[in-house]
Image (cartoon, helix red, strand yellow):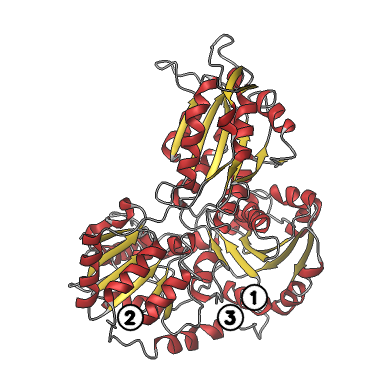
């Protein structure tokens, strides 16, 4: 006779989650972020309280940023471990939709458990319930469907017996990895059921390493051998596969230069002779020059986002082919690529074996030296009294960094400057959320990184605009004693988008605070604001003072915020490539008309194949 345990559905879910293990034997879900409300406090809240010794619960200040912290944890853990986030129904749930989209775009695991309406519909409509006049099965949680890799609505306690294994399969499958949403009806959370005791037995979810198909392997091998100017585009999948050493060995064995996407940066040390550095719109001249001339582009673990491909205008050689080694067939076949569907580490090893002693003869001499000669001076401390540039701020942080430093960012000016200028010496020392480029990820994300790797020196770059969007988890980090450094570059508005506006012929409008409607000039003291939330903070007025402040960070417990005013206009003038942003076809402004001519010219160079 099957042994059973009588538990509420919420208790069963929590007990199952706590029993699921990573390859190391540690819990795969390390804890749960929770803001309780009427949709989850009675059922899930009681279950989490009962399991608090095996599954810690942390309280944040916003459902979106709690989920951001969880996603950053998963990213910095190389997708090997993850977190759960629970909310009430209504706004608590929809606050997490943005985070779900971020995780979906970046292929990162997170378990989202929003409360849902009553399955029995007895008290309908309940507080915060969304009613669809034509569909009685709809709730606010249906918003999660397009941004979840697996979605389920738990309307019966026994549905957990199938839903939970499916959820963990999704989160631990390298090809399907992404956010899971289990919308949990609030009455069902409290209902009891006799669950098989075996359902709660500990289970290890091992990383699946798919080997290449022999025909695909042969086709890509022959394409590499036939190429005169091959180049590698390394994406985030290199990190998630643990393939950084395999990439180095492959590049060296076959003399193929490597370029790095935002997600792939730090796959090779910055000074490796074959590492040409950043590619694309925020890329450098070495990588973009070689990619323009390449007759074979070999993507490894990349989804070929438009910032990587220059909106598919970068790979300009008429004879060029694309091959893609990717665990996801969806990504491996983009733009007619020769697919090599495989785990990156295994795929590189087997591809190298079939290539044998083959080496590319294409040269890249001088490209890196010329690049650093051009950009290194931009990061030097200023000699005059002008406001510092973002490049000079990057230089100051670089000089203060050490072997354990992880720099992170997500949106605004700094992703471009860091991609071009930051020198990463080891894998996973560069954490950029640039798939969704979500303003507000930074502070919560820095907290998640530090929770994933407590011994790392985490430095977060954020602008004043993104700080204003989501800063509440600063208080959470202070409360929990989680230490990281935040450098706030205050350029008094959205400097990055202001430059894009100007670059597409637009007038400066509604981006910098000087160009917006206001009755009272903005004068936010970010240092005092951070201090009010429990952070140690300081406002500095020079690059030298910034460096002095950074030197103190190791002695400070909890979040440490350094604010510096910067010039909103300059950016690195070197590198980069075209990025398609639609310019109006008709305008009364000559600047827009001129920008449209440039747009049409660049559009004509875009490759559809």
User: Is residue 533 visible to the viewer in this orientation of the structure?
Assistant: no
Seen at 41% across and 46% down, the residue is 176
Asked whether 454 or 560 is in front, the reply is 454
**Res 379 label:** 3
Q: Earlier in the sequence, mark 2 or mark 1?
A: 2
Assess whether mark 3 and mark 2 are in contact (beta carbons under 8 angstroms).
Answer: no
Name above or below for residue 348 compared with residue 249. Answer: above
At a point 65% along the width and 82% down the height, the residue shown is 381
- Quadrant of res 458: bottom right
Horizontal relation, residue 126 to residue 309: left or right: right
On-image quarter of the N terminus: top right
> Which of the two marks, 2 or 3, is nearer to us in this view?
2
Residue 160 at x, y percent in the picture: 52, 27
Q: Secondary structure at mark 1?
A: loop
Numbered label attached to residue 403? 1
Residue placed furthest toward the top: 122
Q: Is residue 20 left or right of residue 105?
A: right
The residue under label 2 is 254
- Measured in 3D between alpha carbons, the distance from the residue under mark 2 to the one under mark 1, in whole angstroms, is 29 Å
């Amino acid at each position: 006779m099957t042994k059973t345990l009588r538990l509420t559905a919420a208790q069963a879910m929590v007990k199952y989650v706590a029993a699921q293990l990573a390859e190391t034997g540690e819990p795969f879900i390390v804890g749960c972020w929770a803001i309780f409300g009427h949709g989850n406090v009675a059922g899930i809240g009681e279950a989490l309280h009962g399991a608090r010794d095996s599954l810690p619960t942390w309280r944040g200040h916003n459902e979106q940023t709690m989920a951001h912290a969880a996603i950053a944890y998963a990213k910095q853990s190389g997708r090997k471990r993850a977190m759960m986030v629970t909310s009430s129904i209504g706004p608590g749930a929809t606050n997490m939709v943005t985070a779900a989209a971020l995780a979906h775009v970046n292929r990162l695991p997170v378990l989202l458990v929003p409360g849902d309406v009553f399955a029995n519909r007895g008290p309908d409509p309940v507080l915060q319930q969304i009613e669809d006049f034509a569909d009685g099965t709809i709730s606010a949680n249906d918003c999660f469907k397009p941004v979840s890799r697996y979605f389920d609505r738990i309307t019966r306690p026994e549905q957990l017996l199938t839903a939970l294994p499916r959820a963990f399969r999704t989160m631990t499958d390298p090809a399907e990895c992404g956010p899971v949403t289990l919308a949990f009806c609030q009455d069902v959370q409290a209902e009891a059921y006799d669950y098989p005791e075996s359902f709660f037995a500990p289970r290890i979810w091992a990383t699946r390493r798919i080997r290449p198909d022999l025909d695909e392997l042969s086709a890509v091998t022959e394409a590499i051998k036939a190429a005169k100017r091959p180049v590698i585009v390394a994406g985030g999948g290199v990190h998630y596969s643990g393939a950084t050493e395999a990439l180095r060995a492959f590049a060296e064995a076959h003399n193929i230069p490597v370029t790095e996407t935002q997600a792939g940066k730090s796959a090779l040390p910055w000074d490796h002779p074959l590492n040409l550095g950043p590619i694309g719109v925020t890329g450098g001249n070495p990588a973009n020059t070689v990619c323009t001339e390449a007759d074979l582009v070999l993507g490894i673990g990349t989804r070929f986002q438009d910032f990587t491909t220059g909106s598919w205008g970068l790979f300009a050689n008429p004879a060029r082919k694309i091959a893609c080694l990717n665990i996801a067939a969806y990504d491996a076949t983009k733009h007619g690529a020769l697919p090599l569907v495989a785990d990156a580490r295994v795929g590189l090893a087997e591809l190298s074996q079939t290539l044998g002693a083959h080496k590319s003869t294409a040269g890249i001499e001088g490209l890196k030296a010329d690049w650093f000669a051009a950009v290194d001076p931009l990061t030097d401390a200023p000699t005059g009294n002008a406001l510092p540039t973002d490049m000079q701020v990057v230089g100051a942080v670089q000089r203060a960094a050490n072997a354990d430093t992880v720099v992170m960012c997500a949106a605004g000016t700094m992703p471009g400057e860091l991609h071009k200028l930051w020198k990463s010496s080891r894998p996973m020392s560069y954490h950029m959320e640039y798939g969704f480029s979500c303003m507000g990820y930074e502070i919560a994300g820095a907290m998640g990184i530090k929770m994933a790797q407590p011994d790392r020196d985490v430095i977060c770059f954020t602008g004043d605009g993104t700080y204003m969007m989501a800063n509440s988890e600063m208080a959470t980090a202070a409360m929990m004693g989680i230490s990281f450094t935040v450098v706030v570059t205050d350029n008094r508005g959205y400097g990055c988008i202001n430059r894009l506006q100007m670059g597409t012929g637009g007038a400066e409008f509604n981006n910098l605070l000087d160009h917006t409607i206001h009755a009272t000039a903005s004068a936010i003291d970010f240092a005092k604001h951070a201090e009010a939330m429990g952070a140690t903070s300081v406002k500095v007025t020079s690059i030298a003072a910034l460096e002095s402040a950074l030197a103190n960070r190791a002695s400070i417990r909890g979040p440490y915020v350094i604010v510096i005013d910067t010039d909103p206009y300059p950016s690195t003038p070197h590198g980069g490539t075209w990025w398609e942003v639609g310019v109006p076809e008709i305008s009364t402004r000559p600047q827009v008309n001129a920008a449209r001519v440039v747009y049409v010219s660049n559009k004509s160079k875009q490759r559809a194949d």
